[in-house]
Image: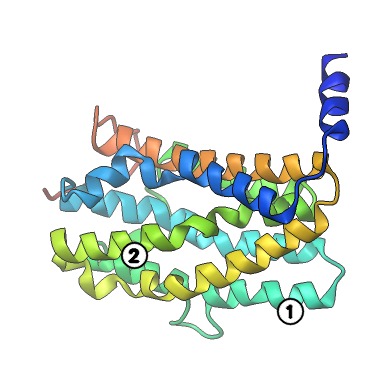
Amino acid sequence: MAVELATREITDQEVLSREQLRDRLLAVGAARYHHRHPFHLKMHQGELTRGQLQAWALNRFYYQASIPIKDALVLAKSDDPAFRRAWRKRILDHDGDQDGYGGVEKWIQLAEAAGLSREQVIPCTGILPGVRYAVDAYLSLVRDHSLLIAVASSLTELFSRDLISLRMDKMRQHYPFLTPGLAYFQGRLTQAPEDATFALDFVSTHAKTREQQEQVIHALEQKCAILWAQLDAIDYAYVAPGNIPPGCFVPHCD
């Protein structure tokens, strides 16, 4: 009964305007996006060791390598050729159109700049269980829900450009050895805003009821929680208290 009443209350509410929906989504980012996470704050203050940066780059690779898989799942949900043509750009952005190109390869180059080898990075054998579970939960969110929810879960790109700009500046300042590996972030400065504009227009157009709009907002909240959970796992294992699970990557440098 409680679920039925809650659903009815949402259904009876007025549909948000496009501007109101955008404001609600931006409020989610301001409160929940991982730019506020303590691990990122330490990174930007120059407080991380090379080993901690290696652990972050290695674990984050599992997420980066899963993004084109996520985008392929989104493509499979749509019967609209125009949508598929627009969305498949994301796969090319990350996989490239030939070996040696694309965001996934550029992330490997960042990990190499941190001091890892690609043989350490690509197999993902040292990934933290918490990171693996969080990323797999993202794939499940996209796979198991509607196209509208799948697209909405990508809307963290609304907030990523500012974080990327800050991260590049702080890495050059505090971790100059990473400078040769910043090509990934440079590309995302233009890719992410373009992708976010398309996704925001899509959800604003296709979320026609208040209930659907609330589902869109909740999907973005879930995505923010997934990003936050990844950093929680990394921070717990490699910063404080520093409990690295058996079989996971162990840094050998300060």
Let me know if residue 115 appears in the view.
Answer: no
**What residue is shown at x 54% (from left), y 43% (from top)?**
27
Q: Nearer the viewer, residue 236 or 26?
A: 26
**What residue is shown at x 83% (from left), y 15% (from top)?**
2
Amino acid on which disc 1 is placed? Arg
Q: Nearer the viewer, residue 109 or 45?
A: 45
Q: Position of residue 126 (x, y in %)?
A: 37, 48
**What residue is shown at x 68% (from left), y 48% (from top)?**
20
Is 226 situated above or below 63? above
Let me know if residue 9 appears in the view.
Answer: yes
Residue 165 is marked as 2
Residue 210 quadrant: top right
Taking the image as shown, residue 80 lies to the left or right of residue 136, namely right
Q: Residue furthest top?
A: 1
**What residue is shown at x 82% (from left), y 65% (from top)?**
78
Residue 222 quadrant: top right
Is 48 situated above or below 81? above
Is 37 situated above or below 95? above
Residue 108 quadrant: bottom left
* Mark 2 vs mark 1: in front: 2
Q: Residue furthest left?
A: 254
Amino acid on which disc 2 is placed? Ser
Q: Nearer the viewer, residue 187 or 252?
A: 187
As helix, strand or loop, the secondary structure at mark 2 comes to helix
Q: Position of residue 131 (x, y in %)?
A: 45, 42
Taking the image as shown, residue 64 lies to the left or right of residue 214, namely left
Could you tell me how far apart the alpha carbons at marks 2 and 1 are, in whole angstroms? 28 Å
Q: Position of residue 96 (x, y in %)?
A: 53, 80
Residue where numbered disc 1 is placed = 85
Q: Residues within 10 Å of mark 2 (few under 14, many from 20)?
A: some
